Image: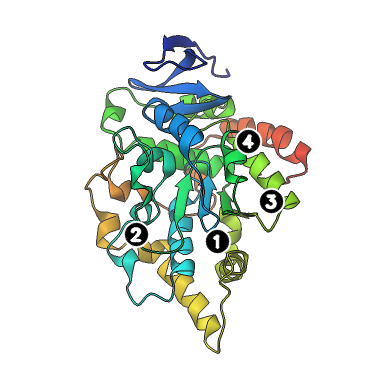
Amino acid sequence: MPFISNYETFSDQNPHPDSTIQKQKWFSDEFLCKFKGFWIWSPYLEPTKKVVEDFKPLPSDVILASFPKTGTTWLKALLYSIIFRSSKEKPLLFNHPHELIPSLETKLYLEESNGKNLEFTDHKVRILGTHIPYQIIGDILNSSDCKIVYVTRNPKDSLASLWHFVQKAKKFDEDPWTVETAVDQFCNGVVPFGPYYDHVLPYREESWKRPWKIFFVTFEELKEDGKKHVKRLAEFLGCPFEGENKEEQVEEIVKNCSFEILSNHEINKSSEMPECFPLPYNSFFRNGQVGDYNNYLKPEMIHQIDAITRQKFHASGFVYGI
């Protein structure tokens, strides 16, 4: 049976036009809160509002947007390596990709920092991450000439990756988020920054309208031909590979940002907790494969998700995800 939401309400601690927020249990005692049509994990609700109210992108900014668990960590490594490839240092050896490219709502605009950490880099280009949907942040991103890179992933693999990710939480054993519940919630859109389909489509549509502004790529495309899309990214970002050794430059970036290499760096194997995130560094590296969902989702679950994919994606002209 589909997951039926038993909504609760609560009042914001701070005055807000929407003083009553829909609240839905996720797992254990964790809740999702509905904000402008999307479900936000409760600790990130206020930071998300602050981003909407206060963030002003610079023309030189590069914004990596994504739905959770769709290849964000990989793209952060690739973007950093492409843009700052002239640096003789090798920051990916000693820094987790999420430290090099911080997220607006899950780090920079958390209550204690209030966006003051935006001056986090000595580089002329700031690379910032976000999971905020285009429907919420689009006008803000369009207020400057900043570039947007969006990555998505097969919905079934995205869900499987999210389900595994949540299992790293200490609370998971107390009240597990079962795969059955995860599938039903995903199909109903009640997952962090969901609905997934409503998150993906506007970024894709905007990338067709304004390819100079938004670069849209899938996890599967990157896996199939990483060199091709790294070159495309560099062109899009205004820093194309040049010189006699340009092919070697591309190959080195693709190799150094591969799952096999990144997952073996000590920082990425660490069980230490990031300053602003409740899961360890090593939780971001698990498998990195296409089609891994087949190992965890039953045939009826796959059919359930595929039916919605046809309805949402295929009917919109985006033949993807099945």
In the rendered structure, are the residues bearing label 2 and label 4 in contact, judged by CB atoms less than 8 Å apart?
no
Residue type at numbered disc 2? Ser
Relative to 128, 230 lies left or right: right
Residue type at numbered disc 1? Lys
State the mark number for residue 223.
1
- Where residue 321 appears, as percent x and y from the top left, is 64, 44
Q: Which of marks 2 and 4 is nearer the N terminus?
A: 4
Residue in view at x 52 percent, y 38 percent: 132
Element under disc 2: loop
Measured Cα–Cα span from mark 1 to mark 4: 21 Å
In the rendered structure, are the residues bearing label 1 and label 4 in contact, judged by CB atoms less than 8 Å apart?
no
Residue type at numbered disc 3? Ser
Measured Cα–Cα span from mark 3 to mark 2: 31 Å
Judging by the rendered image, the residue that carries numbered circle 4 is 197
Residue in view at x 46 percent, y 28 percent: 40
Judging by the rendered image, the residue that carries numbered circle 2 is 263
Local crowd size for mark 3, using a 10 Å CA cut-off: few (<14), some (14–19), many (≥20): some
Mark 3 vs mark 2, foreground winner is: 3
Measured Cα–Cα span from mark 2 to mark 1: 16 Å
| Depth check, front residue: 105 or 38 | 105
Local crowd size for mark 1, using a 10 Å CA cut-off: few (<14), some (14–19), many (≥20): some
Element under disc 3: helix
Residue found at the far left of this picture: 272
State the mark number for residue 184.
none
Q: Quadrant of residue 199?
A: top right
Judging by the rendered image, the residue that carries numbered circle 3 is 207
| Depth check, front residue: 59 or 229 | 59
Is residue 192 in view?
no
